[in-house]
Image: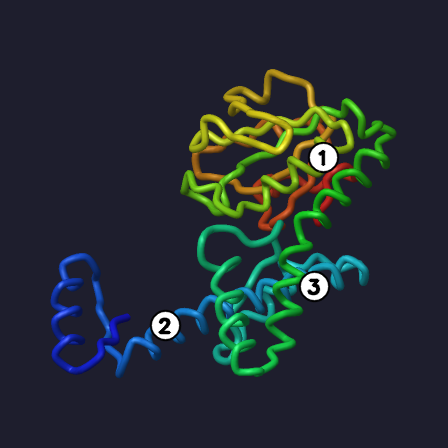
Protein backbone atom coordinates (compact mmCIF):
# COMPACT_ATOMS: atom_id res chain seq x y z
CA UNK A 1 0.00 0.00 0.00
CA UNK A 2 1.64 3.22 -1.17
CA UNK A 3 0.44 6.78 -0.79
CA UNK A 4 2.74 9.63 -1.67
CA UNK A 5 2.64 13.38 -1.14
CA UNK A 6 1.65 13.70 -4.80
CA UNK A 7 1.14 11.64 -7.97
CA UNK A 8 4.83 11.68 -8.93
CA UNK A 9 6.10 10.49 -5.54
CA UNK A 10 3.36 7.83 -5.41
CA UNK A 11 4.40 6.44 -8.78
CA UNK A 12 8.09 6.56 -7.85
CA UNK A 13 7.53 4.74 -4.56
CA UNK A 14 5.34 2.12 -6.25
CA UNK A 15 8.01 1.50 -8.88
CA UNK A 16 10.67 1.15 -6.18
CA UNK A 17 8.62 -1.40 -4.23
CA UNK A 18 7.26 -3.36 -7.20
CA UNK A 19 10.19 -5.85 -7.37
CA UNK A 20 9.68 -6.74 -3.70
CA UNK A 21 5.95 -7.52 -3.75
CA UNK A 22 3.46 -9.49 -5.82
CA UNK A 23 1.08 -6.52 -5.78
CA UNK A 24 1.50 -2.83 -5.00
CA UNK A 25 -1.63 -0.76 -4.52
CA UNK A 26 -1.58 3.02 -4.63
CA UNK A 27 -3.86 5.34 -2.67
CA UNK A 28 -4.34 9.09 -2.59
CA UNK A 29 -1.91 10.03 0.19
CA UNK A 30 0.23 8.68 3.08
CA UNK A 31 -2.58 9.20 5.59
CA UNK A 32 -4.93 6.92 3.66
CA UNK A 33 -2.24 4.25 3.42
CA UNK A 34 -1.50 4.45 7.13
CA UNK A 35 -5.15 4.39 8.14
CA UNK A 36 -5.77 1.39 5.88
CA UNK A 37 -3.09 -0.55 7.74
CA UNK A 38 -4.45 0.49 11.12
CA UNK A 39 -8.00 -0.39 10.05
CA UNK A 40 -6.95 -3.83 8.87
CA UNK A 41 -5.13 -4.76 12.07
CA UNK A 42 -7.76 -3.20 14.33
CA UNK A 43 -10.41 -5.23 12.49
CA UNK A 44 -8.45 -8.38 13.22
CA UNK A 45 -7.85 -7.45 16.87
CA UNK A 46 -11.56 -6.83 17.46
CA UNK A 47 -12.60 -10.07 15.78
CA UNK A 48 -10.01 -12.11 17.68
CA UNK A 49 -11.39 -10.71 20.94
CA UNK A 50 -14.91 -11.63 19.79
CA UNK A 51 -13.82 -15.15 18.82
CA UNK A 52 -12.33 -15.73 22.26
CA UNK A 53 -15.38 -14.33 24.03
CA UNK A 54 -17.80 -16.44 22.01
CA UNK A 55 -15.58 -19.51 22.50
CA UNK A 56 -15.86 -19.00 26.26
CA UNK A 57 -19.62 -18.62 25.81
CA UNK A 58 -19.75 -21.90 23.88
CA UNK A 59 -17.95 -23.72 26.68
CA UNK A 60 -20.37 -22.30 29.23
CA UNK A 61 -23.23 -23.63 27.10
CA UNK A 62 -21.64 -27.05 26.67
CA UNK A 63 -20.69 -26.50 23.02
CA UNK A 64 -17.41 -26.98 21.14
CA UNK A 65 -16.60 -23.61 19.53
CA UNK A 66 -14.74 -24.75 16.41
CA UNK A 67 -17.65 -26.74 14.90
CA UNK A 68 -19.87 -23.73 15.58
CA UNK A 69 -17.42 -21.43 13.77
CA UNK A 70 -17.14 -23.82 10.85
CA UNK A 71 -20.92 -24.05 10.60
CA UNK A 72 -21.21 -20.25 10.59
CA UNK A 73 -18.53 -20.09 7.89
CA UNK A 74 -20.75 -22.04 5.50
CA UNK A 75 -22.62 -18.80 4.90
CA UNK A 76 -21.35 -17.70 1.46
CA UNK A 77 -21.13 -14.00 2.30
CA UNK A 78 -20.82 -11.59 5.20
CA UNK A 79 -18.80 -13.84 7.52
CA UNK A 80 -15.07 -14.39 7.97
CA UNK A 81 -14.06 -17.07 10.48
CA UNK A 82 -11.81 -16.11 13.37
CA UNK A 83 -10.68 -18.77 15.81
CA UNK A 84 -9.99 -18.60 19.55
CA UNK A 85 -6.45 -18.66 20.86
CA UNK A 86 -4.09 -17.71 23.69
CA UNK A 87 -3.98 -14.02 22.75
CA UNK A 88 -2.41 -11.87 20.06
CA UNK A 89 1.28 -11.51 19.24
CA UNK A 90 3.73 -10.11 16.74
CA UNK A 91 4.51 -6.53 15.86
CA UNK A 92 1.17 -5.61 14.21
CA UNK A 93 -2.08 -6.70 15.84
CA UNK A 94 -1.08 -6.08 19.50
CA UNK A 95 0.43 -2.69 18.63
CA UNK A 96 -1.27 -0.97 15.70
CA UNK A 97 -4.67 -0.43 17.36
CA UNK A 98 -2.88 1.45 20.14
CA UNK A 99 -1.42 3.81 17.55
CA UNK A 100 -4.96 4.41 16.32
CA UNK A 101 -6.30 5.06 19.83
CA UNK A 102 -3.46 7.50 20.51
CA UNK A 103 -4.24 9.47 17.36
CA UNK A 104 -7.97 9.44 18.11
CA UNK A 105 -7.27 10.66 21.62
CA UNK A 106 -5.58 13.74 20.18
CA UNK A 107 -8.81 14.69 18.39
CA UNK A 108 -11.07 13.57 21.29
CA UNK A 109 -12.70 10.81 19.28
CA UNK A 110 -13.70 7.87 21.51
CA UNK A 111 -13.38 4.29 20.26
CA UNK A 112 -14.82 2.19 23.11
CA UNK A 113 -15.20 -0.98 21.06
CA UNK A 114 -11.53 -0.94 20.06
CA UNK A 115 -10.40 -0.18 23.61
CA UNK A 116 -12.51 -3.00 25.03
CA UNK A 117 -11.18 -5.47 22.46
CA UNK A 118 -7.58 -4.54 23.27
CA UNK A 119 -8.22 -5.03 26.98
CA UNK A 120 -9.77 -8.43 26.28
CA UNK A 121 -6.82 -9.51 24.13
CA UNK A 122 -4.33 -8.32 26.74
CA UNK A 123 -6.08 -10.38 29.39
CA UNK A 124 -6.25 -13.57 27.35
CA UNK A 125 -2.85 -15.05 28.39
CA UNK A 126 -3.83 -14.63 32.05
CA UNK A 127 -7.07 -16.50 31.28
CA UNK A 128 -5.04 -19.35 29.79
CA UNK A 129 -2.77 -19.38 32.84
CA UNK A 130 -5.79 -19.58 35.14
CA UNK A 131 -7.23 -22.45 33.10
CA UNK A 132 -3.90 -24.29 33.29
CA UNK A 133 -3.86 -23.92 37.07
CA UNK A 134 -7.47 -25.09 37.27
CA UNK A 135 -6.62 -28.17 35.23
CA UNK A 136 -3.67 -28.98 37.48
CA UNK A 137 -5.96 -28.67 40.49
CA UNK A 138 -8.55 -30.94 38.84
CA UNK A 139 -5.84 -33.60 38.62
CA UNK A 140 -4.73 -32.99 42.23
CA UNK A 141 -1.35 -31.62 41.14
CA UNK A 142 -0.07 -28.68 43.23
CA UNK A 143 0.96 -25.74 41.06
CA UNK A 144 4.25 -25.48 42.90
CA UNK A 145 6.76 -27.76 41.18
CA UNK A 146 4.19 -28.91 38.62
CA UNK A 147 5.94 -29.91 35.39
CA UNK A 148 4.29 -27.89 32.63
CA UNK A 149 5.33 -28.03 28.97
CA UNK A 150 4.31 -25.34 26.49
CA UNK A 151 4.18 -26.47 22.86
CA UNK A 152 5.33 -23.56 20.70
CA UNK A 153 6.37 -20.12 21.93
CA UNK A 154 6.38 -18.19 18.64
CA UNK A 155 3.42 -15.88 18.22
CA UNK A 156 2.16 -17.79 15.18
CA UNK A 157 2.82 -20.98 13.25
CA UNK A 158 5.86 -21.30 11.02
CA UNK A 159 7.92 -18.40 12.39
CA UNK A 160 10.62 -17.97 15.02
CA UNK A 161 9.30 -14.59 16.14
CA UNK A 162 8.38 -14.29 19.83
CA UNK A 163 7.64 -10.56 19.87
CA UNK A 164 4.56 -9.94 22.04
CA UNK A 165 3.91 -13.69 22.06
CA UNK A 166 1.25 -14.73 24.58
CA UNK A 167 3.54 -17.65 25.46
CA UNK A 168 5.86 -15.33 27.34
CA UNK A 169 3.12 -14.19 29.71
CA UNK A 170 1.77 -17.72 30.12
CA UNK A 171 5.21 -19.07 31.03
CA UNK A 172 5.78 -16.16 33.43
CA UNK A 173 2.41 -16.64 35.09
CA UNK A 174 2.98 -20.34 35.66
CA UNK A 175 6.53 -19.80 36.89
CA UNK A 176 5.30 -17.12 39.30
CA UNK A 177 3.27 -19.70 41.22
CA UNK A 178 6.19 -22.12 41.35
CA UNK A 179 5.53 -24.35 38.35
CA UNK A 180 8.53 -25.95 36.66
CA UNK A 181 7.97 -24.64 33.13
CA UNK A 182 9.58 -25.76 29.87
CA UNK A 183 8.81 -25.39 26.19
CA UNK A 184 9.17 -27.27 22.92
CA UNK A 185 9.64 -25.08 19.84
CA UNK A 186 12.22 -26.21 17.24
CA UNK A 187 12.12 -22.74 15.66
CA UNK A 188 13.10 -21.00 18.91
CA UNK A 189 16.21 -22.73 20.36
CA UNK A 190 16.40 -20.51 23.44
CA UNK A 191 14.20 -18.00 25.15
CA UNK A 192 14.55 -15.30 27.76
CA UNK A 193 11.71 -15.32 30.26
CA UNK A 194 10.87 -13.32 33.36
CA UNK A 195 12.12 -16.20 35.51
CA UNK A 196 15.33 -16.74 33.54
CA UNK A 197 16.57 -18.31 30.29
CA UNK A 198 15.01 -21.48 28.91
CA UNK A 199 16.14 -23.86 26.19
CA UNK A 200 13.91 -25.74 23.76
CA UNK A 201 13.16 -29.32 24.85
CA UNK A 202 13.75 -31.37 21.68
CA UNK A 203 12.39 -34.70 22.95
CA UNK A 204 9.43 -33.96 25.24
CA UNK A 205 8.01 -37.47 24.80
CA UNK A 206 10.90 -38.87 26.86
CA UNK A 207 10.00 -36.85 29.95
CA UNK A 208 7.10 -36.85 32.40
CA UNK A 209 4.74 -33.86 32.44
CA UNK A 210 1.85 -32.91 34.65
CA UNK A 211 0.33 -30.72 31.93
CA UNK A 212 0.97 -29.89 28.27
CA UNK A 213 -0.28 -26.56 26.93
CA UNK A 214 -0.71 -26.35 23.16
CA UNK A 215 0.16 -22.75 22.35
CA UNK A 216 1.58 -22.62 18.81
CA UNK A 217 1.80 -25.89 16.91
CA UNK A 218 4.26 -25.79 14.00
CA UNK A 219 4.22 -28.24 11.10
CA UNK A 220 7.48 -29.71 12.47
CA UNK A 221 5.90 -30.62 15.80
CA UNK A 222 5.21 -34.33 16.24
CA UNK A 223 2.38 -34.63 18.75
CA UNK A 224 1.63 -38.32 18.25
CA UNK A 225 2.84 -39.02 21.78
CA UNK A 226 -0.03 -36.93 23.14
CA UNK A 227 -2.48 -39.46 21.70
CA UNK A 228 -1.16 -42.27 23.89
CA UNK A 229 -3.38 -43.66 26.61
CA UNK A 230 -0.92 -42.53 29.28
CA UNK A 231 -0.45 -39.02 27.84
CA UNK A 232 -0.56 -36.10 30.28
CA UNK A 233 -3.54 -33.74 30.40
CA UNK A 234 -3.60 -31.33 27.45
CA UNK A 235 -4.81 -27.74 27.39
CA UNK A 236 -5.50 -26.75 23.77
CA UNK A 237 -5.45 -22.95 23.62
CA UNK A 238 -6.31 -22.68 19.92
CA UNK A 239 -8.91 -25.43 19.78
CA UNK A 240 -8.02 -26.39 16.22
CA UNK A 241 -7.52 -30.03 17.15
CA UNK A 242 -3.82 -30.92 16.60
CA UNK A 243 -4.42 -33.90 18.88
CA UNK A 244 -7.93 -34.44 17.57
CA UNK A 245 -7.61 -37.76 15.64
CA UNK A 246 -8.32 -39.58 18.90
CA UNK A 247 -11.56 -39.07 20.85
CA UNK A 248 -10.97 -36.36 23.44
CA UNK A 249 -10.50 -37.97 26.87
CA UNK A 250 -11.70 -36.33 30.05
CA UNK A 251 -8.17 -35.01 30.60
CA UNK A 252 -8.10 -33.01 27.37
CA UNK A 253 -9.75 -29.63 27.63
CA UNK A 254 -9.85 -26.39 25.74
CA UNK A 255 -9.54 -22.81 26.88
Percent across and percent down for residue 97 are: 51, 67
Report how far apart the C-alphas of labels 3 and 1 lie in the structure.
23 Å
Mark 2, residue position = 34
Q: Is residue 77 left or right of residue 26?
A: right
Q: Residue at position x 51%, y 80% from top? A: 78
Percent across and percent down for residue 9 are: 15, 75
Nearer to the camera, 110 or 220: 110
Query: From this viewpoint, is residue 245 visible?
Result: no
Mark 1, residue position = 174
Nearer to the camera, 224 or 120: 120
Task: Specify which label sits upstream in the sequence, 1 or 2.
Answer: 2
Q: Residue at position x 41%, y 42% from top? A: 159
Q: Is residue 1 above or below residue 164?
A: below
Q: Is residue 94 above or below residue 249?
A: below
Percent across and percent down for residue 197 are: 55, 25
Q: Is residue 153 left or right of residue 179?
A: left
Mark 3, residue position = 53
Q: Residue at position x 76%, y 63% from top? A: 57
* Secondary structure state at the residue bearing disc 1: helix
* Disc number lying in front (3 or 2): 2
Circles 1 and 2, Cβ within 8 Å, touching? The answer is no
Task: Specify which label sits upstream in the sequence, 3 or 1.
Answer: 3
Q: Residue at position x 64%, y 17% from top? A: 207
**Which residue occupies the extreme top position in the image?**
206
Task: Specify which label sits upstream in the sequence, 3 or 2.
Answer: 2
Report how far apart the C-alphas of labels 3 and 2 lie in the structure.
29 Å
Query: From this viewpoint, is residue 172 visible?
Result: yes
Nearer to the camera, 1 or 7: 7
* Secondary structure state at the residue bearing disc 3: helix
- Answer few, some or many: residues within 10 Å of disc 3's Cα (few below 14, many 20 plus, some between 14 and 19): some
Report how far apart the C-alphas of labels 1 and 2 lie in the structure.
38 Å
* Secondary structure state at the residue bearing disc 2: helix
Amino acid sequence: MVGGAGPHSTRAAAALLAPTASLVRTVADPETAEMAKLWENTYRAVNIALANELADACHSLGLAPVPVIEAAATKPYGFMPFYPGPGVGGHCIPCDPHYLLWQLGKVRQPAPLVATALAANSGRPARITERALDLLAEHAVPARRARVLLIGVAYKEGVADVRESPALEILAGLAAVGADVAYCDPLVPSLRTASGPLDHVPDPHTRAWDLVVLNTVHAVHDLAWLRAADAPPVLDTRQRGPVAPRPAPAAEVTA
